[in-house]
Amino acid sequence: MSTTPNAAGLAPATLAVAAGRPARVQGGHINPPIPLSSTFVSQGVVTPDELSYARGDTDAWHPFEQALAALECRGGSADGEAAGQAIVFGSGMAAIAAVFSLLPDGGTLVLPQHAYQAGMVLAHEVSARHGVTLRHVDIADTDAVVAALDGADLLLVESPTNPMLEVADLPAVLGAARARGVRSVVDNTFATPLGQQPLLHGADIVLHSVTKYLAGHSDVVLGALVTRDAELATTLRGHRTLHGAIAGPFEVWLALRGLRTLALRFERAQVNAAELVRRLADHPEVAEVRHPSLPGDPGHERAKAQMNGFGAIIGVRPRERAGVGPVERADAVVDAVRLWLPATSLGGVESMMERRRRWGTEAQTVPEDLLRLSVGIEDIEDLWADLDQSLRA
Ligand SMILES: *Cc1c(COP(=O)(O)O)cnc(C)c1O
């Protein structure tokens, strides 16, 4: 693990490019190599810092883990607080499973009523198998979240939420959890570490579907956790080793390659999204637009206070038409796009959309005709022209 450059004081866009770079030596690599070794030369007692078998640890993970930790933990206190560690997993769901493994049998999990749907399905499975009580809350309702924390073991936060884009008051809910000794995890997939840093607001763990913005090219499935708590990191890494929820060397290399351009990609996607939101709000074929950039959005002020930008995911409900059901109407818009891709997932360079309730596991309080738009980095006028014609079709 000798490749971390001294990251102190570097701006996030620079960290995304420079953190986790190989050591600067004559003839050395600019990019880390892709080490393909399932085992390592080792004899006798192995210390935790030594590589021995690639399910437990491999240098294939370290450059990406260092870069992500540098981004999520930057700007923390200068008083010697642990810098933080990232732990890469084979998927975002594997990372969520590792976090849920912290719950004791019969414990209590506080979680958003709207959140990533497979995570909710897993929470219900954990609940059924381990007698864990689930307390679903409106994560934007701070009083409700705080009230639900009494006697809880773990708070899961998503902000903005998937797909409703509700914004939690991160300092308030994470501070309340900390004050009550309730461990907290924030899914930071939508905001990225450039958009917000939950660890600075008091989160114990940050979670990512690396599949989305961090890798950014819709070509890998990966996840990660980040924490400043060294003991917790050891526990989570131990879960990864025992459950085998590990990432392949090629995939992690691609994720680091993607991370290098995160600042440019996310900046462009956010600018595109804000402009599309502005135009959609005035569109005759649109009934509702959800995005924290809208001054009238319930999460607008909070997002302004705790985020850098408003993200690049938009919720849209098409205006209904006589004789056409809302589901049919929304599906017709998705059918009509030519440049936008009808696909699930988000955070790639390409713009995508889907009607979320087509998934049977999506929360029933999500409107049936809500389209989730993931805005990419294409030319804004091309995106607008296609969106406009699909809404009018
Ligand atoms: C996609 C996603 C996940 C799950 O990640 P995978 O990489 O698909 O396993 C978790 N949380 C959010 C917010 C997501 O969008």
Image (tube, grey):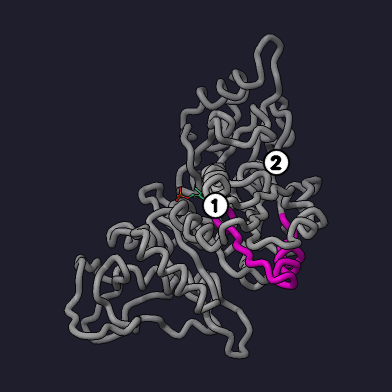
Query: Image check: 251 left or right of 151?
Result: left
Q: Residue at x 48, y 43 (%)?
A: 345
| Position of residue 358 measured from the top left corner of the image (x, y, whole percent) | 54, 28
Give the residue at the far bottom of this rendering.
79
Looking at the image, residue 344 lies above or below residue 73: above
| Disc on res. 79 | none
Where's the C terminus, which quadrant? top right
The tag earlier along the polypeptide, 2 or 1, is 1
Label 2 crowd (10 A; few <14 / some 14-19 / many >=20): many
Membership of 111 in magenta stretch: no
Q: Is residue 161 visible?
A: yes
Query: Image check: 334 left or right of 157?
Result: left
- Distance between the alpha carbons at the discs numbered 2 and 1: 36 Å
SS state under label 2: strand
Badges 2 and 1: C-beta atoms under 8 Å apart?
no
Q: Which residues are magenta?
A: 168-190
Q: Residue at x 68, y 31 (%)?
A: 367
What's the residue type where badge 2 is placed? Answer: Arg
| Position of residue 333 measured from the top left corner of the image (x, y, whole percent) | 57, 24
- For this rendering, which residue is in front, 294 or 212? 212
- For this rendering, which residue is in front, 322 or 85? 85
Say which residue label 2 marks.
Answer: 290
Say which residue label 1 marks.
Answer: 130
Question: For residue 155, which quarter of the picture?
Answer: bottom right
Label 1 crowd (10 A; few <14 / some 14-19 / many >=20): some
Q: Is mark 1 within 8 Å of ligand 1?
A: no
Membership of 183 in magenta stretch: yes
Q: Nearer the viewer, mark 2 or mark 1?
A: 1
| Position of residue 111 measured from the top left corner of the image (x, y, whole percent) | 65, 52
What's the residue type where badge 1 is placed? Answer: His
